[in-house]
């Protein structure tokens, strides 16, 4: 059977309908690939690079990947130089992660609400 020919009645007799549909899809894909339709566009996606994030509030740094870029660089522990991204808060300084959360005075809030909006 020649896969370059279009589907004919004879192919339908030799191949089941599901397989004929798969063959038709395979032909379309191979034709589009040979014409170059599926080439990726250049310069569409940002460049992903390794950068050092530095928490300026507690002097904590970590190496990660990002699409952000910076003119500042820093020498990391492995001896390589990476772009430096300064952040104001990270897991090292955020109250949720450090356990230094404030406990809200819920009773005081309710009393203030009743005092402000309650019956006089």
Image (cartoon, rainbow, N blue to C red):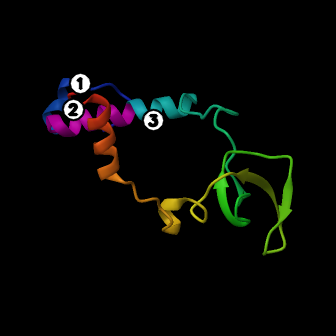
Q: Is residue 58 magenta?
A: no
Q: CA distance from mark 3 to mark 2?
A: 19 Å
Camera-nearest residue between 80 and 70 = 70
The crowd level at tag 2 (other Cα within 10 Å; few <14, some 14-19, many 20+) is some
Residue 87 is situated, as x and y percent measured from the top left of the image, at 69, 52
- The residue that label 2 is drawn on is 11
Is 28 above or below relative to 75?
above
- The residue that label 3 is drawn on is 30
Residue 46 is situated, as x and y percent measured from the top left of the image, at 67, 39
What's the residue at 58%, 30% (across, down)?
Answer: 36
Q: Is residue 117 visible?
A: yes
Residue 16 lies left or right of residue 35; in this view the side is left
* Magenta stretch, residue numbers: 15-27
- The residue that label 1 is drawn on is 8
Residue 11 lies left or right of residue 71; in this view the side is left
Q: Are marks 3 and 1 in contact (CB under 8 Å)?
A: no
Q: Is residue 19 magenta?
A: yes
Residue at disc 1, secondary structure? loop
The crowd level at tag 3 (other Cα within 10 Å; few <14, some 14-19, many 20+) is few
Residue 66 bears which disc, if any? none
Camera-nearest residue between 108 and 6 = 108
Q: Are marks 1 and 2 in contact (CB under 8 Å)?
A: yes
Residue 89 is situated, as x and y percent measured from the top left of the image, at 63, 54
Is 50 above or below relative to 2?
below
């Amino acid at each position: 059977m020649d896969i370059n020919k279009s589907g004919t009645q004879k192919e339908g007799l030799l191949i089941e309908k599901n397989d004929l549909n798969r063959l038709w899809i395979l032909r379309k894909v191979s034709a589009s690939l040979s014409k170059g339709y599926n080439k990726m566009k250049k310069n569409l996606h940002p460049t992903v690079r390794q950068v050092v994030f530095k928490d300026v509030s507690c002097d904590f740094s970590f190496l990660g990947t990002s699409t952000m870029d910076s003119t500042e660089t820093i020498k990391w522990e492995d001896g390589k130089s990476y772009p430096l991204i300064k952040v104001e808060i990270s897991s090292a300084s955020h109250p949720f992660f450090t356990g230094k959360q404030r406990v809200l005075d819920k009773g005081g809030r309710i009393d203030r609400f009743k005092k402000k909006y309650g019956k006089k």
